[in-house]
């Protein structure tokens, strides 16, 4: 930035010096009534002023080119710089367009992220509800398991009682069978005695006759 300001100041100063020198030289040539190329003194003075200004301007440019490498490159490569500048502007326009597209995609991504966060919150709420239900289910399962243990204990006790009842039934059936056998024996003995009594009665009747 400082080099550019110095360059501008040098150009302004040299421009003033060129204008002053050219004017003084043209004035002197006009006063001397010199003629060049069969021109009138006034035209000769104007020509000398123009030539002197051109020579001094050329010297100024030569000095500037010799002392400022960026200026020398800038002047002789202005077409290339302009082309690169146009390409840079195109790239900038393309970059701005891509930036706009990226910003739109970013906004869409933010909207999708917000939607995903909303769904995530809903899932978290559902998960919390599920965890609460799971805890309640586990509690109910523990209660049911305790009740099942009680039922199994009662079942085991009932089975023991059933075994005792079956044993008692078997013993009773055995006693009943024994009693039935004894009853049959008694019935047979009774029948035998009845037959013997009838036989004795017959014999007694015969004896009486």
Image (cartoon, rainbow, N blue to C red):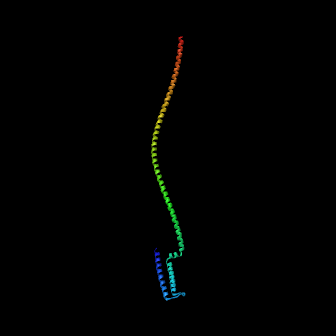
Picture coordinates of residue 50 (x, y %)? 51, 83
Q: Residue at x 46, y 49 (%)?
A: 129
The residue at the far top in this view is 209
Report the quarter where the C terminus lies.
Answer: top right
Q: How many marks?
A: 0
Where is 74 relative to 106, above or below? below
| Residue sitting at x 51%, y 24% | 183
Name the residue located 48 percent from the left edge and 32 percent from the top edge: 165
Position of 39 relative to 172 (above/below): below
User: For this view, does 78 lie left or right of residue 132?
Assistant: right
Q: Nearer the viewer, residue 199 or 130?
A: 130
Frontmost residue, 33 versus 48: 33
Q: Is residue 133 above or below residue 15?
A: above
Residue 87, position as x, y percentages in the image: 54, 69
- Give the residue drawn at x 50%, y 63%: 100
Across and down, in percent, residue 201 comes to 52, 15
Rendered location of residue 160, percent (x, y): 47, 35
């Amino acid at each position: 930035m400082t080099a550019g300001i110095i360059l501008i100041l040098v150009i302004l100063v040299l421009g003033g010096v060129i204008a002053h020198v050219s004017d003084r030289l043209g004035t002197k040539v006009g006063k001397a009534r010199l003629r060049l190329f069969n021109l009138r003194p006034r035209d000769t003075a104007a020509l000398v002023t123009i030539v002197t200004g051109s020579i001094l301007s050329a010297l100024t440019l030569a000095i500037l080119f010799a002392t400022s490498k960026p200026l020398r490159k800038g002047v002789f490569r202005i077409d290339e710089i302009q082309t690169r500048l146009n390409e840079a502007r195109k790239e900038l326009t393309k970059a701005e367009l891509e930036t706009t597209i990226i910003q739109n995609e970013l906004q869409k991504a933010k909207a999708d992220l917000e939607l995903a966060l909303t769904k995530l919150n809903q899932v978290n709420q559902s998960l919390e509800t599920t965890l609460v239900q799971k805890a309640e289910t586990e509690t109910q399962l523990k209660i049911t398991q305790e009740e099942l243990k009680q039922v199994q204990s009662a079942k085991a006790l009932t089975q023991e009682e059933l075994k005792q009842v079956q044993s008692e039934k078997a013993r009773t059936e055995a006693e009943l069978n024994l009693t039935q056998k004894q009853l049959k024996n008694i019935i047979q003995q009774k029948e035998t005695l009845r037959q013997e009594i009838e036989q004795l009665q017959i014999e007694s009747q015969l004896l009486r006759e």
